[in-house]
Image (spheres, rainbow, N blue to C red):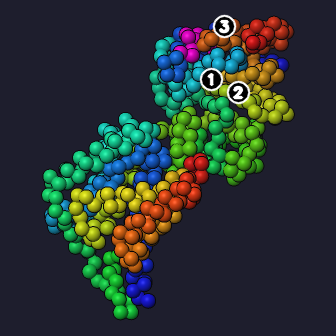
Amino acid sequence: MTARPSAMLSARPSAMLSVSGLESGYGPGAVLHGVDFELRAGRVTALMGRNGMGKTTFLKTVMGLLPARAGAIVFDGHDIAGLPPHRIARAGLGYVPQGREVFDDFTVAENLRLSLLGHLGKAKSVPERVLAWFPILAERAQQRAGTLSGGQQQMLAIGRALAADPKMLLLDEPTEGIQPSIVHEIGETLARIARETGLTVLVVEQNVDLVLTVADEVAFMDNGAIVETTSAAALARDDTILARHLSL
Amino acid sequence: MAELAAIALNATSYVLILILVALGLVVVFGMMGVINMAHGELFMLGAYVVVAAQGAGAPFWLAVLAAPLVVGALGAIIEGLLVRHVYRRPLDTILATWGLSIALKQMVVLSFGPASYSVVAPVEATIAFGTFAYPVYRLILMAIAVVVIAAVFWVFLRTDFGLAARAVIARPDTAACLGIDTRRLYRASFVIGTAVAGFAGALVSPLISVDPQMGLGYLIPAFLSILVGGAGPLAGVLAGGAVVGGTDSLLTVWLSPVVAQIAVFGLAILVIRLRPQGLLGARDGA
């Protein structure tokens, strides 16, 4: 468990992302039925829940990949509902999609460069600290991303999002299809990044070990709504919480 | 021997023009899923820019430089009014741009009449290959075409713009989530494609008869070049253009235009049967 010093406890917590009454879905069907969710600045929150409950849909709607049919999405004080994805990204929201989605035919360096191109006016080169968190990205800079292992591709996807120096990071199942030893390494690195930078993080994850490694808070989604929010510490103490939300 | 050299040179100039036309098509298709049936008419309009300039007494080379600007500007208008509404819907794009091609042809008929024009080459000199006199203008055309093709490749393979464009081709949503404005890239790529087509039309105008129907004669082999070469990597257009254009122009000389057409279509069918992704095609873009 990572105990993080937090200034948020003293003052009134400020929300980095505040979602209310959010409805969204594919085609005629609704997947999200009024999501109310507030994420405080500088905190790492894990979003858990059974498959098909709307976790990925929620992230895609926040990023503007799916239109919000109702509700508000306020990020860092700005209403981002209805903006196209590139504007949301430029507002400071980094996104690591499910399945990593690295550009297989591009080199590692080109994958990272794309993130800088999307944020003109920001850093001209990949920040040193990103390469310090993921040294493999410097070592394999000229290698095609498609030749990396799954875990390395995940590090590239995370590094790519961080290269643009976002205010908040959204991760969709970063451990899916990755071997257990690397899962732990990615978890440790994410916890370190959050600790060192105070980055606000929302991670959709099924892997309880990873959640307990990185998260301060855990929210559960069921049938397109947030049904319970608890601290990671409480989750570690009480098995019944997980059983209640994740067992079939 | 000299005659053979002339035939080879003619085939080469045809292949290069075909590649110029096909490049614009393949970029627009790969990136936006738009099958642009009006691409041949944009090529035709490039030639008419030269016709209009010649009528006004303007120098040929000025007209050749103006053609990509005029046609590119028209491309920007077409993108804004028509094409952006049908992105990623290939069947709809065929209908919409087919309608556009008819409208553009009629526009030219109304402005210039249905008859054909001939453009005077700016360089009348010929160069002697033994007993054979070869027009210098064709050699200049080939040199310019090579430079423009290389420039298009450089833009898409070596610049940041090209990196972002290829990213949008491969994974549009992911590129957008990295902050890349896909709309702006679509528009810029469409304009580049149309401008290159207009430039090709202007360049080739002294060699052919300029008439409202000339676009189709280049559009079909350009499409075949893409099918044969593969729509994935840009280099597929080079291979496809060489195979389609080379076969067509060589067999036209040695046998007959009809045999050449049949051979080209037969070849295209064969390639599509054996290698559906094209000669150089891969499953993923870039």
Chain to which mark 2 belongs: A
The Cα atoms of the two marked residues, 2 and 1, are separated by: 9 Å
Label 3 vs 2, first from the N-terminus: 2
Label 2 vs 1, first from the N-terminus: 1
Neighbours of disc 3 within 10 Å: few (<14), some (14-19), many (20+): some
Q: Is residue B120 magenta?
A: no
Q: Which sits in the foreground, A84 or B220?
A: B220
Q: Which residues are magenta?
A: A30-44
Q: Which mark is residue B192?
A: none
Amino acid type indicated by mark 1: Thr
Q: Are marks 3 and 2 on the same chain?
A: yes
Q: Is residue B272 left or right of residue A166?
A: left
Q: Which residue is mark 3?
A: A227
Q: Which residue is mark 1?
A: A56
Chain to which mark 1 belongs: A
Residues at circles 2 and 1 in contact by the CB criterion of under 8 Å: yes
Q: Which mark is residue A173?
A: 2
The dominant secondary structure in magenta is strand
Q: Are marks 1 and 3 on the same chain?
A: yes
Amino acid type indicated by mark 3: Val
Label 1 vs 3, first from the N-terminus: 1
Whole-percent x, y for residue B161 in the image: 50, 49
| Residue B198 in sight from this viewpoint | no
Q: Is residue B168 left or right of residue A156?
A: left
Q: From the viewer's perspective, is residue B189 above or below residue A208?
A: below
Please report the residue visible at 51 percent of the width from the left and 33 percent of the height from the top: A86
The Cα atoms of the two marked residues, 1 and 3, are separated by: 16 Å
